[in-house]
Amino acid sequence: MTDILVRPAPTTEVIAADLARSLRLGTRYTPKDASDAEFLDALDDPDVLMGVVGFDDVWWLLQHARDPLVLVPAVVTPRPGGTPGAIERVLLPLDGTEEAARAVSETARLFHTAGIELVLLHVFDARTVPACWDQAAHAREAWEAEFRARFCAPLVPHLCPEITLCSGAPGEHVVEVAAREADLVVLGWSRRLAPDHARTVRAAVDAAAVPVMVIPVRARLCSVISDSAATGE
């Protein structure tokens, strides 16, 4: 069976248990006093799909982990109408690049197959706002149709979830929308922490009230999930 690796803590154990139930995975736990290096070594086990850890002091793990990490705040605040400890709605921020969409595509299909609702978010900034955005409504509709075709349809074919559109700093909107709409945020990232990279990941880890799954680009999640689904394990 494919497992979720958990660093024990009250909130990480609750979230890991719900993910394991929804995704039909097992769980295994490291000792509470295991070092980051020991956790990373355990995460490299071929039978481990992802890790679940607290928000505190995660940057070394994030930079070195090749597999997804679910980062859980010390206090998880359920969204309005949400069930404490349950992952029922997942927020997928899309930045309009194919790389980011590919990074989360298999995860999106996995959650959809498990019956978990997907919530899509795209944030414009001064560089990316479409020229047609101040024009007639049909121009916006055309832009949204093209965006869906390029970045949403590959995530989950035949599903057309609503897209929330915002303008401003992506990290701030991810935190705000997650608090209202989601139980988990899924972010793809390049494992680069230079000042001009990972702003959204930094903002989410600093301020999100719900767990954040961070998926390294080209993580091995895709092949493991496909194999697990095919065998029913």
Image: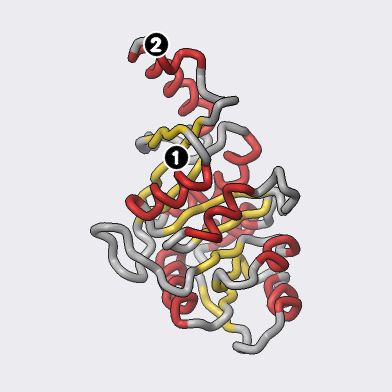
Residue 218 point in image, percent of width and height:
70, 49
Identify the residue position indicated by label 2 in the image.
135
Q: Is residue 4 visible?
A: no
**Residue located at (71% from left, 43% from top):** 196
Residue 199 point in image, percent of width and height:
62, 48
Quarter of image, res 128: top right
Q: Is residue 84 visible?
A: yes
**Residue located at (47% from left, 59% from top):** 208
Circle 2 or circle 1, nearest the eye = 2
Decide which of 47, 127 is in the foreground and name it: 127
Dot placed on the residue nearer the N-terminal end, 2 or 1 = 1
**Identity of the amino acid at label 1?**
Leu
**Residue located at (55% from left, 73% from top):** 54
Residue 136 point in image, percent of width and height:
35, 10
Decide which of 78, 19 is in the foreground and name it: 78
**Identity of the amino acid at label 2?**
Gln
Task: Tell me how many marks there are.
Answer: 2
Quarter holding the N terminus is bottom right
Q: What separation in Å lies between label 2 and label 1 (alpha carbons)?
A: 21 Å
| Label 1 element class | strand
Q: Is residue 39 left or right of residue 157?
A: right
Q: Are dots 2 and 1 in contact, CB under 8 Å?
A: no
Quarter of image, res 82: bottom left
Q: Which mark is residue 121?
A: 1
